[in-house]
Image (cartoon, rainbow, N blue to C red):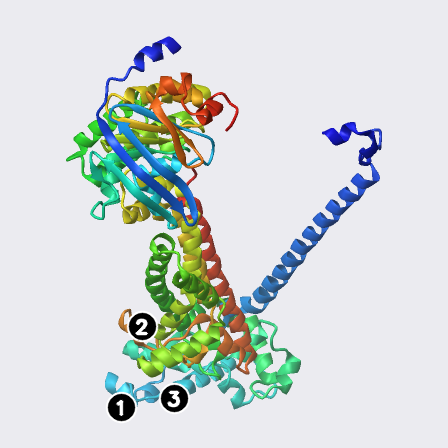
Amino acid sequence: MTDATDPGTIPAQPARHTSGSLLTASARTKRRNAAEARFKAYGIAAIAIAVLALCFLMSSIVRDGAGAFRQTYASIPVTVSAEVVDPKGNRDPAEMAKVISLSYGKLLDDSLKAWIAAENIRIEGLSDADTKSFFSGEAPARLRNMVLADPELVGQTVEMTALTSSRIDGMFKGRVTEETAALDSKTSVAQFRLAQAMKENGALVTKFNGDFITKPDASDNRAEAAGIGVAILGSFYMMLIVLILALPIGVAASIYLEEFAPKNRLTDVIEVNIANLAAVPSIVFGILGLAAFINFVGLPRSTPVVGGLVLTLMTLPTIIISTRAALKSVPPSIRDAALGVGASRMQTVFHHVLPLAMPGILTGTIIGLAQALGETAPLLLIGMVAFVTTFPAAPPEGFFDPASALPVQVYNWTQRADPAFSERASGAIIVLLIFLLCMNLLAIFLRRRFERRW
Amino acid sequence: MNDMSLVERRLVQDEIKITARDVQVFYGEKHAIKDVNVDILDKTVTAFIGPSGCGKSTFLRCINRMNDTIDICRVEGRIALDGEDIYDRRVDPVQLRAKVGMVFQKPNPFPKSIYDNVAYGPRIHGLARGRAELDEIVEKSLRGAALWNEVKDRLQEPGTGLSGGQQQRLCIARAVATAPEVLLMDEPCSALDPIATSQVEELIDQLRQEFSVVIVTHSMQQAARVSQKTAFFHLGNLVEYGETDDIFTNPQDPRTESYISGRIG
């Protein structure tokens, strides 16, 4: 203050804002506004790129995978010849069961030839091999099951919707053309023309493929019969195990660490380790699972129980971190209020803090589960990649039966030669994405539903 | 108004409820409370005044051991409630807090219904044997907190939906419901507007009939209005403790005098 009165030491006045009129923006203001506009443009561009990438991903998956939900069937009358299926003629189920699927294949083949003759369809160069490979290897097996279930059918002519081979199916999904058929050892131009003729005739129908969702995987030569039933069930079992184990363990650990544990070096170390655990590559958990659960404990390979345990280890850090964040976000005034009326620490946590943290905990858990659902690498190491065509039993025994998992099934199918499998892989991805979407919607719903304001 | 409260302020009680002897509080290395000796009377409003950071809230939180929740906090000396050392090894702080209720600076009702807010304490302490008895406690507590008439028709509505002043009175009702002997109030009106403040102050004066009330306040006017005894804290020391009238009209210590006349603080 005394300085200011001394004329010798008056400090230089800071430059005044001298733009004058408020109606014209100064150069400085213009620069600032331009910077802000640029920043907004960057942001919009980033979002646009993300949306475009997502659209591209979605459209390519849907384009490739939509075909998996439709399948071509041939609808022709099949004569169940008694000489073939019941050579002894006594309708004894035990005797009939001795007839293998191959003989039923002959039935289908004969019926197709008879139908072609009856409909007066003439295809140049149609060979025996063409009619023989027309149906899926799965079709005779289904016919056999049908006849064994109902011996009345023997000797009759039944209208059957038989699964066609993946090449025939491909002809109606644009995968197989006359040109590619000419070069393909598994089909021929004659077979292609036969299929087209049958389509015009109405004997070939492409309809919704429920079997894709419900049936198990099939061998390399029967792409048309492969489904994701076992994989869905296996994934579901694993999610069940993860939920049962990871939620209580994770929440209990978080509550202890957040509300009870003394803050000392040991808890610091634990905290850092949990954070690090969340960043450990998932394949490492697979190696751990292989060493600990399969080699040491001796649990059976490629079973949901091992997969579930490994995924539990992987999901725990996610759940612990999100639960601790949720507990931290509960205002301390609530704890004070509860302690102030004489609640014990445990009562404070369970009556007040936990209910308020619930939306956060549930969201974290569901996100952790969604992560686990899409995890592939650790499952490869514990043998979930095995070819499994039998459904696991109901839990809890089913947890110890071999099963597949959705992401592993996708991985598995992309390795196979027949292009029909890559279509099915994309179809399985669509199913997986739908599950993930449902889980995320559930998380949003729960958050909205239980969110409390104060 | 001043004359009235002067008349009312005549002390009729001299039964000692809380005794503090040589109390020291440390936050880690920081010596927050130094050598506090004080006798708090039953059925009296005692005000703790002093500038920010002088330790008045810290000392208040020692009385029901709320400081236990802070890891780095360490209390030495002796604080006795009815002659029993509350820092004795055998004392369960949960039991102590049922006897020494607390109302906080910011209204902090549970995000539950008004009824559940008040009923929570009696429930966990098993004070009611049935629904009817619990209803009775809730009504009595809400009446005690001068809130009953405003909320009796909406007891099932969330307590967080009330206005700030109502929320604070709800918190007082919640504290009263556990039938404490001492009620600690940590700046209960600092988040309230003047009208809500005067309602709460009126309430504090009524609470004196049943409890020993200790109130921490930033406002010297408030201390003068509601309390019978006043303690002035400065930099962790209890500078002066005495009749509110004496502190405000005839302070003994120059620091007290500077504070109440507005020269420091």
User: Residue placed at 52% from the left, 90% from the top?
Assistant: A128
- Place of residue A223 in the rendered image (x, y in percent of width and height, measured from the top left): 49, 79
Q: Are marks 1 and 3 in contact (CB under 8 Å)?
A: no
Q: CA distance from mark 1 to mark 2?
A: 43 Å
Q: Can residue A120 be seen?
A: no
**Which circle's residue, 2 or 3, is located before the other in the chain?**
3
Q: Tag 2's secondary structure?
A: helix
Q: Nearer the viewer, mark 1 or mark 3?
A: 3
Q: Quadrant of the N terminus of chain A?
A: top right
Chain label for disc 2: A
Q: Amino acid at mark 2?
A: Phe
The answer to whether any part of residue B81 appears in the image is yes
Q: Which residue is mark 1?
A: A88
Pointer 3: what residue? A103
Q: Residues within 10 Å of mark 2 (few under 14, many from 20)?
A: many
Is residue B156 placed above or below A441 in the rendered structure?
Answer: above
Say which mark, if any, is on residue A399: 2
Q: CA distance from mark 2 to mark 3?
A: 37 Å
- Earlier sequence position, callout 1 versus callout 3: 1
Q: Chain of mark 3?
A: A
Q: Nearer the viewer, residue A126 or A364?
A: A364
- Residue under disc 1 on the same chain as residue under disc 2: yes
Mark sitting on residue B14 = none
